[in-house]
Image (cartoon, helix red, strand yellow):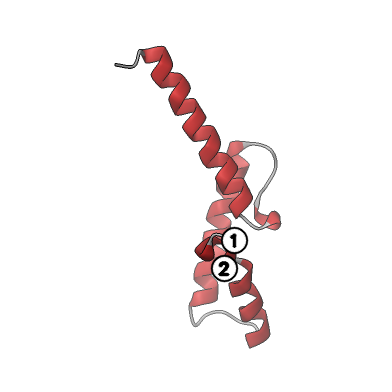
Amino acid sequence: MLKASDLSKLLFIFYFQAYQDLRCTLPEQYRGCDTKLDLLRGAVEYIRHLQKCLTNDYEGTSAERVGYVQSFTHIIYNE
């Protein structure tokens, strides 16, 4: 059975890895600064951007839309 301090260290490692994964997954313009809060804000902004790209409200050329889709295909295909 894990001690509280061991569990705390393990959770810290998991959170750290999750933030690193998120930082590597987001396109550069959405990564924010070095703080975790800025990283999370960037992730929310990126999700909103993707939602906008998938709705009919998106204003842009089809080439721009293809570019946006290609910008996040690495997430889907784990490239």
Residue 53 x/y as whole percent: 55, 74
As measured in the structure, the alpha-carbon distance from the residue carrying label 2 to the one carrying label 1 is 8 Å
State the SS at label 2.
Answer: helix
**Which residue: 50% across, 64% down?**
76
Q: Earlier in the sequence, mark 2 or mark 1?
A: 2
Residue 17 x/y as whole percent: 54, 37
Q: Is residue 40 above or below residue 75?
A: above
State the SS at label 1.
Answer: loop
Q: From the viewer's perspective, is 55 left or right of 24?
A: left
Q: Amino acid at mark 2?
A: Thr
Is residue 61 among what the camera can see? no
Residue 73 got which mark? 2
Residue 5 got which mark? none
Quick one: 10 or 65, which is closer to the camera?
A: 10
Q: Quadrant of residue 59?
A: bottom right
Closer to us: mark 2 or mark 1?
1
**Which residue: 45% across, 25% down?**
10
Residue 50 x/y as whole percent: 54, 68
Q: From the viewer's perspective, is 11 left or right of 71?
A: left
**Which residue: 54% across, 61% down?**
75
Residue 79 got which mark? 1
